[in-house]
Amino acid sequence: MGHTRRLDELTAGDADRFGGKSAGLGELLRAEIPVPPGFALDADATELDDALRTELADRYAELGTGAGAGSPDPPVAVRSSAIGEDSAEATFAGQQDTYLWVRGVDEVGEAVTRCWASLHSAEAVAYRERFHVARPAMGVTVQLMVDAAVSGVLFTCNPVTGDPSMVAINAAWGLGLAVVGGEVTPDDYLVSKVTGEIVRATVNDKRIEYVPAEHGTRRVEVGEDRRAAPCLDDGTIVRLVELGTGIARHFGSPQDVEWAIDRAGELFALQSRPVTGLPQPQAASAPTSAMALVMKRFGA
Amino acid sequence: MTSTATQTGAFPSPYEIETPEGCEGWQEMYPYYALFDERRRESDENRFWFWNSMHFPTPHPAFDVICIDSPYQAVGSWQNRVFAVPPAMGIDYRCVNGYIYISGNPVTDPAKIAERAGFFQRRAGYYYENWPELYDRWRAKMESLIAELVALEVPDLPEYEPDEVAFSEERNTAFYEVLHAYGRVLRLGDLMWQHHFEFLLLGYGAYATFAELCKTNLPDIPDQHIAQMVAGIDVLLFRPDAELRRLAALALEREVDGAFVQDRSPTEIEAELARSDAGRAWLEELERVKDPWFNMATGDGLTHYYRSWLDDPSIPYASIVGHISALRSGEQAARPTEEIERERERLAQEYGSLLPDEVRGPWQDLLALSRTVFPYVEEHKFYCDYWFLTRWWNKVREFGALLANHDFLEDGEDIFHLSRHEVSTALDELVLTWATGGLALGPKYWPPIVARRKELIERLGQWTPPPALGIEPAEVTDPMTIMLWGVTTDRVREWARQTAGGTSLNGAAASPGTIEGPARVVRSVTEIAEVRDGEILVCGSTSPAWAPIFSKIKGTVTDVGGVMSHAAIVCREYGLPAVVGTGRATAQIRTGQRIRVDGSAGVVTLVGEE
């Protein structure tokens, strides 16, 4: 079809046309990482004319009959997929729009139009200027919604220290909005990739969560019984570490992964991008020899 | 005189520590140079001193001061005069209310540091290059030293010298022999300490360098993974316990395990075993194991309190009883050495692959060097602190018995309440009056002194020493303080914070896992028997010879020690969470209090006070 593709038809090479997010999800699917099915709009589509409306309707119907949909008008997430988004120096994180729990082809069309409009938001313009992103163009990603019991982000290194032997996980109840938007202090885990040992675990007071509403999502208070309870168990942490290391291995660089676990306990990667602004451990001086280091330890 | 009244640091001035009630005059137990003296105040008050609770957790008896003097004479000799470690000379000690505080002497003059670097590189380089050969020689040296100690006879004072003295050129009179033997015992101790520190600094140094390179490139690597990559498989220190497991398996195999009933004394167990052929065969095997594996101490050996398994067989027997019941419930008899070996190689492989290319080569070389030096780091404990010292304290006891036989002491053990110089003086009078037939004053002179000192040690034991005295250093730079005691800048900061109080303690994450339970504060080895199943051990430090305790407790917290301390090593072996080097756990935690030990994060929380 003209302006759209299924996500599993895309590869990294399609980033110029479909944007980094859609292309990245295509790569994840190629690597057999569990990703909710979806389709992508290219950056040349800029107007919701009849042709495009039909194309969207067909794609949406295809999603509705596919695996995991559960309904002919399944809830989907509509996100912008900017061109140039995945450059390692500048992550466009949060600079474009995300619409969750969008249902029916009319709502999908509306969300797509709003994504295009976000291109011209003041923040997006300032961001592009700062990082010299020239072309104001974007694709759109439409993906089946994961009805998340728990969601969060993970880094396949410690983003604070740069330690490559660690996976850092943030997790909170409900949809990922609360964590990504910094509206909740998530549970915080640092896990050794080498042994799977949980090196640091901080369970925080998670006051709010986002849950599906009839249209879109709503923010609700978390009940007393769940607020201070850990939202991950040891087995889930192991699965998250495996998910993260698998993705990092596929891309060959440390990754920042958004993930969600649905109410049946199934884990999905929602997106992945290279970790930016990582501290470079010990860039100052590479050791010359073992003995020189021992001598230095003794001050000689 | 310059005024030094202002105390700038976070810790109490050593000159403002009060003498506990009823302990007036405690200073008489210690040499003049061990005290915070007014004539040295300007210097001593402006230094950082920390309580060496790792080696001296309880008030120090007068005789045992030799085990402060000798080690610091020895460590300073190697560090300062032989290897000339560039920024650090030796370690000074002082005694406050019977507790030992230490402080390193830094070298600050850049020209001196450069000069010392030349010595260090040449001499330390020689040791690293020739380590295996030099260490083989060291072992032989230690074994012959121990043989000499064991063979050394403490002569009696007979009414008449034997004929040989009259008729042979070879024999000396007993007065000389007694004085000579006493002098020789002291010198053998000095020799042991000299050997003890010959390799120690360099061994710890290589390991510390490896650990540092790991942490620079893998900032979050748990300390225990570093230790796991280095630690040996056939560690000598695990051998005594391995022998006990083997004896336990043998008892089951020969079907004599019925004799091993909990709370039965070793004598009762042995009496029952002696009634059957199979039991007698087991006892014969036990005798073979004893030399040398029962020369294991109940503690780090720096005071006479620590006896060996030979002296107190209830410890190994309790262990055997525990192993037998573990074996009955299907546990493996031997440590899973192959599994440990595989995991050690896997860790080295995986961490190595995560390193930047330019670091990997030096890192692998350092790992190899650390593995080369590590046997010494672990084994010297067995040779020096356990085998030699427990024998040595017993040799001193023989002089105690001699003095007690002549009424200079009420009990042979009382010798430990006299300084080594006082013992020398007492022996002088003893052999003098033995020779002259005159009336000895000793029996009237020494017993009251001993009685007062027993009371002092008892009372001082109730006092809790602060973790540090004097000024808080901007930075801890002394490599030895960091490597041997785990006293880092961060640790000192934490002590300073805790001096103001708090409800959690930080230390090194020594053995992973989290556990909550009632605390049992154990200040000395004599309190071991009070530990109950399921408690969390809180102590100054431990030694792996406390094996029976580790099968009872759920976790460990120590005041002092790094991840290579024995509490840490044993807890990893037993899979118990441990936090070491908290500075003042024994001061802040009470027996019975609920605590939570997070051995992965290195935090101890006092649960009731959150």
Image (cartoon, coloured by chain):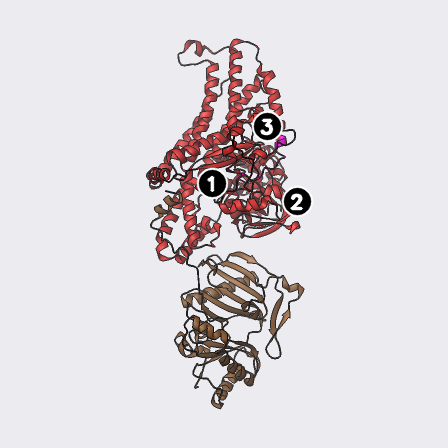
Chain colours: A brown, B red
* Type of secondary structure dominating the magenta stretch: loop
Compared to A36, does B249 lie above or below? above
Q: Pinpoint residue A294: horizontal percent, then vertical percent.
A: 38, 45
Which segment is the magenta one?
B458-472
Does residue B287 appear in the picture of this structure? no
Distance between the alpha carbons at the discs numbered 1 and 3? 28 Å
Mark on residue B26?
Answer: 3
Q: Residue at x 46, y 48 (%)?
A: B227
Say which amino acid is labelled 3. Answer: Trp
Vertical relation: B599 (above or below) B190: below
Looking at the image, tell me whether mark 2 or mark 3 is earlier in sequence order: 3
| Magenta region includes residue B206 | no
Question: Is residue B460 in the magenta section?
Answer: yes
- Estimate the x, y position of residue B76 in percent, counting from the top left: 43, 33
Q: Are marks 2 and 3 in contact (CB under 8 Å)?
A: no
Number of the label disc, if any, that sits on residue B481: 1
Disc 2 residue type (three-letter): Gly
Task: From the viewer's perspective, tell me whether residue B78 is left or right of residue A145.
Answer: left
- Under tag 1, what secondary structure? helix
Which residue position holds label 2?
Answer: B592
Q: Residues within 10 Å of mark 1 (few under 14, many from 20)?
A: some
Assess disc 2: are there few (<14), some (14-19) or many (≥20) residues with their C-alpha within 10 Å of its C-alpha.
few
Q: Where's residue B196, x and y in %?
A: 43, 34
B28 and B324: which is toward the camera: B28
Which chain is mark 2 on? B
Q: Nearer the viewer, mark 2 or mark 3?
A: 3
Q: Which residue is rendered at x = 33% and y = 50% of the image?
A: A288
